[in-house]
Amino acid sequence: MLKDNEYFESDAVKEAVRGRWPLALGSLLPEGFQTALQKPGKQMPCPFNGGKTRFRFFRDTLNERGSAICNCCGAFSDGFEVLMWANKWDFRTALEAVGESLQVQPKTRLTGTPAKPRSNVVVPEIPRWAKNLQERMAKVRTVSPERARSKILSAWNEGLALTAPEAAPFLRYLMKDRGIRLRVSSKLFDTEHLRFHPALPYYEETIQEVDGVETSKWSCLGDYPAFMGALRNADGELVTVHRTYLTPEGRKAPVESARKMMAAPSDMEVNGCSIKLGDPVGGVLGLCEGKETGWAAMSATGIGVHSLVNTSLMAGYQVPLVLKDQVHTFIIWQDKDVSKAGEEAANTLKDRLEVEGFKVFVFEPPMPIPEGEKSVDWNDVLKTQGVLGFPDLRFLRRSAPVRRQA
Ligand SMILES: [Zn+2]
């Protein structure tokens, strides 16, 4: 347990846990997560919402990053995010728990510096099975950052403009399936950020265990038309690509996960990235999770939106440097979920952007979550209520666009 005048440096803890995530996660995750952790790569029920094949740890990156994904709850780019989600902890608590678990050397606070409130989480010993898992995972061949980058670039470089004649399945999807009508202009469909792939291979990983040794096999289940969004960091660098697989008729492809993010190179950070769907208007920019929500809001309000893909990326969004002087106000087009995850992520982001000196408005879909559904978003509002379901944004022009210095 840390003494009152001690604290962990976040860089020291991050360094200590890199390559040792199975140990930290093995001791700190609640029981409901342990089966999935012991079989990394295998699709398991969501620890919170059940189902069959929803949640998994990434086998290739378990040691290095501890990352995981849940089809209903979102993507978790490292073990800290998994711990925060699983234990409902804030980052500081997760950091302290990992530091304690791996016995990182704490720093001593200078006398006179006020102590921050301590989380005082009781950290159990690292179980035997987690040590075995650590050894097994250390033998997994990891994808080098160069290899990951070349896969991302090859998919991206094969992409066409969303306005190309070949991209008809995308326009059908947008108009018929999602009820979204956008003015087709080069501004909206910027190939720096959005592209269409006429036949993108869809792969699924299966893990087989032969004589106690796990081997993973990737099988191609077919080629599908797909639209791709570039996840760029605050500096504008391409970090990875998000794909949505379609049918030629413009429906979602009949695959397990029609929306997938490509594995990011291990030397780059997905947290903080965003997909640009449109430009700010009069200093106002929209933010949302899924691209469809963003396009729905753009078609209803005319104000550009950036898609942050899921709740964990929403909570970690970094304002792109080029926008810092262009934007004074953000509108968060929040998803409304039974789990409240969308609301929590939107509020976390709002608080942080306000500290940076931006004005922030959060709008929740003004409709109930239909029986049997997990959530509603602003695309559902557009489909059921049209543009009249959207808030009147004329008040934004009256609110003084003066940005405080943070
Ligand atoms: Zn889930």
Image (tube, grey):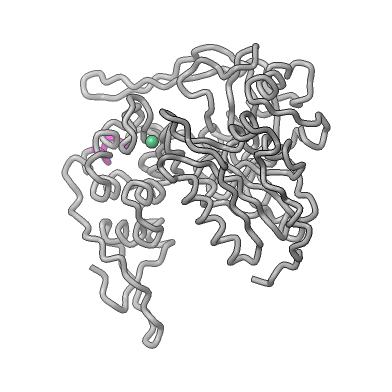
Q: Quadrant of the C terminus?
A: bottom right
Asked whether residue 136 is drawn in magenta, I would say yes
Please tell me whether residue 70 is drawn above or below residue 321 in the rendered image: above
Give left or right: position of 256 versus 377. left
Q: Is residue 113 left or right of residue 239?
A: left
Instruction: Say if 208 sits above or below 10 in the image.
Output: above
In percent of the image, x 53 and y 48: which residue is there? 271
What number of labels is visible?
A: 0
Q: Farthest residue in the right direction?
A: 185
Ligand 1 placement by image quarter: top left
Q: Residue furthest bottom?
A: 112
Give the quadrant of residue 404: bottom right
Magenta stretch, residue numbers: 133-138
Q: Does the magenta segment cover residue 371?
A: no
Q: Closest to the observer: 45 or 122?
A: 45
Q: Residue at x 61, y 35 (%)?
A: 381
- What residue lies at 51% left-to-right and 55% top-to-bottom? 347
Q: Quadrant of the N terminus?
A: bottom left
Q: Say which of 389 and 233 sits in front.
A: 389
- Which residue is more in the foreground, 386 or 342? 386
Spot occupied by residue 316 in the image (x, y as percentages of width and height): 53, 52
Q: Is residue 186 left or right of residue 396?
A: right
Predominant secondary structure in magenta?
Answer: helix
Relative to 366, does residue 206 appear above or below in the rendering? above
Residue at the (27%, 46%) spot, across then down: 29
Q: Can residue 49 be seen here?
A: yes
Residue 390 location, x and y as percent?
67, 42
User: Can residue 158 be seen by looking at this rendering?
Assistant: no
